[in-house]
Image (cartoon, rainbow, N blue to C red):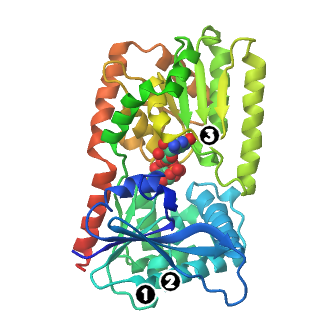
């Protein structure tokens, strides 16, 4: 069996290599467990750079995985990562063309960095390799590798939604972007909607390619274990004591406009206004670690959220009760699972989301004798698998308010019945099955 070569924009930093750090690392851990693997990408470091600057590849071997990373110049980081990937492709793929800040020169840098990735990866490749490329930062990387003569099987997985062609074509040269995807032997997306949208795009533009659905999941066993074991952690006990027996609502999202945080705060505010009996009798913790803080839209969102949290706390708070506990810094992973377990309700209300792993983590973390209630947006990629949650339209503050009231007053029998329907899928569709299914499809599509 040849090597698996994973390419993603970010590669876990040295200190995170042994443990699973972020979402992608967790999901890929299973795939990287066997055989020998190479993981290639950006180091996370920016350097000054100059004309003719050519980054060195730095190599680090940990167990069976070789991590190969390159630095980017400030100009590459700005044009490729901040502007084109996060300021254009991200909003567009989340159906927010109005937030797109398009500039032709950033597209050029995006293509150049993809070509740079291909050039730096090429000498590291070996016969028998299968290459698996991840996410919107690297749409054209497969084509860039083919242009250099790579004949290995190459697969691409898109972690975020893919919009209908009528919207996608707002991106100048979107047809060219789709055309580069002919380079892939397997193209994976999260949901049937995404596959339909992408395949419609392919057929309109006349591209011979086909997207298939490979929904991502979590490691439920590990997460359930962490949730239970963490209950004895002093910080988890402190949180529990601070609740003084009150029911507890949790939200956990990167501070991103796709997550619907502002609409969620409005929903909570409406809930406090329309259901005064819950005032002072419930606690809501929103964990929203700042992300992409240099992109203007993210800075504006943070200001809006600060203002909304302040307004809600100022309006409904009392000297001994704060309606929203709002954190813009991350909570350690070891605590998070137990926080979910303590929570009677989880609010997962993105306006658009590729999948949303938080919804699955919350379900996995529950005590099966006394599970909490998941409130889930129709627009999360997880929605089709999780329809036994309380489903809401995140744009409708009254619907969120009603769902909160319903969740907080739901009889234990109904909570258990809903959770019993949600839990099996979280165990059936996992990070392991996702990686296994994709890699199997890649091996079948073009035997290495
Ligand atoms: C993209 C797609 C798709 C969050 N806050 C903290 C923290 N987290 C962890 C969560 C979860 C992960 O980060 C977030 O995953 P999501 O799936 O919810 O969202 P994105 O980051 O937007 O991920 C998404 C995913 O890729 C996978 O394909 O599902 O749709 O947008 O694991 O628990 N972790 C810690 N502290 C925090 O404060 N430790």
Q: Earlier in the sequence, mark 1 or mark 3?
A: 1
> Is ligand 1 less than 8 Å from the beta carbon at label 2?
no
Residue at image coords 63%, 74%: 72
Residue 368: image location, x then y, percent:
31, 24
Q: Earlier in the sequence, mark 2 or mark 3?
A: 2
Residue at image coords 40%, 55%: 190
Residue at image coords 59%, 24%: 284
Q: Determine the CA span between mark 2 and mark 1.
A: 7 Å
Q: Which mark is residue 341?
A: none
Residue 283 visible (yes or no):
yes
Residue 443: image location, x then y, percent:
24, 72
Q: Secondary structure at mark 2?
A: helix
Mark 2 and 3 residues: CB-CB less than 8 Å, in contact? no
Residue 191 visible (yes or no):
no
Q: Which mark is residue 288?
A: 3
Residue 25: image location, x then y, percent:
43, 56
Mark 2 and 1 residues: CB-CB less than 8 Å, in contact? yes
Q: Determine the CA span between mark 2 and mark 3.
A: 35 Å
Q: Secondary structure at mark 1?
A: helix
> Is ligand 1 less than 8 Å from the beta carbon at label 3?
yes
Q: Which mark is residue 123?
A: 1
Task: Look at discs 1 and 3 and give the one toward the viewer.
Answer: 1
Query: Is the C terminus in the top left, top right, bottom left or bottom right quadrant?
Result: bottom left
Residue bearing the label numbered 2: 120
């Amino acid at each position: 069996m040849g090597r698996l070569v994973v390419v993603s924009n970010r590669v876990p930093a040295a200190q995170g290599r042994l443990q699973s750090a972020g979402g992608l690392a967790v999901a890929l851990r299973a795939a990287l467990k066997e055989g020998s693997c190479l993981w290639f990408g950006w180091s996370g470091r920016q350097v000054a750079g100059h004309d003719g600057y050519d980054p060195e590849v730095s190599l680090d071997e940990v167990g069976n995985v070789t991590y190969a990373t390159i630095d980017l110049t400030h100009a590459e980081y700005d044009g490729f990562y901040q502007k084109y990937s996060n300021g254009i492709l991200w909003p567009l793929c989340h159906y927010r063309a109005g937030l797109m800040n398009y500039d032709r020169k950033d597209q050029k840098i995006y293509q150049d960095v993809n070509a740079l990735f291909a050039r730096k990866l090429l000498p590291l490749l070996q016969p028998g390799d299968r290459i698996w490329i991840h996410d919107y930062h690297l749409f054209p990387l497969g084509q860039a590798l083919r242009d250099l003569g790579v004949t290995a099987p190459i697969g691409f997985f898109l972690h975020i939604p893919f919009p209908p062609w009528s919207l996608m074509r707002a991106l100048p040269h979107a047809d060219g972007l789709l055309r580069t995807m002919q380079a892939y032997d397997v193209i994976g997306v999260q949901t049937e909607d995404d596959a339909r949208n992408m395949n419609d795009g392919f057929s309109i533009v006349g591209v011979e390619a086909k997207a298939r659905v490979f929904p991502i999941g979590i490691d439920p066993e590990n997460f359930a274990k962490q949730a239970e074991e963490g209950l004895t952690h002093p910080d988890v006990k402190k949180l529990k004591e601070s609740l003084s027996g009150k029911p507890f609502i949790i939200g956990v999202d990167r501070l991103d406009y796709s997550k619907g945080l502002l609409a969620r705060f409005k929903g909570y505010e409406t809930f406090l206004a329309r259901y005064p009996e819950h005032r002072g009798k419930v606690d809501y913790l929103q964990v929203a670690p700042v992300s992409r803080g240099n992109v203007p839209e993210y800075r504006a969102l943070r200001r809006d959220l600060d203002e909304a949290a302040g307004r809600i706390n100022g309006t409904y708070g009392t000297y001994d009760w704060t309606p929203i506990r709002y954190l813009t810094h991350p909570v350690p992973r070891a605590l998070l699972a137990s926080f979910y377990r303590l929570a009677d309700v989880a609010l997962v209300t993105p306006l658009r989301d590729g999948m949303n792993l938080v919804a699955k983590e919350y379900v996995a973390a529950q005590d099966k004798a006394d599970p909490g209630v998941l409130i889930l947006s129709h627009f999360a990629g997880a929605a089709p698998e999780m329809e036994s949650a309380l489903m809401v339209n995140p744009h409708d503050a009254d619907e969120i308010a009603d769902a909160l009231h319903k969740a907080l007053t739901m009889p234990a029998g109904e909570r258990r019945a809903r959770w019993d329907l949600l839990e099996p899928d979280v165990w059936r569709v996992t990070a392991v099955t996702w990686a296994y299914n994709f890699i199997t499809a890649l091996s079948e599509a073009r035997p290495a």
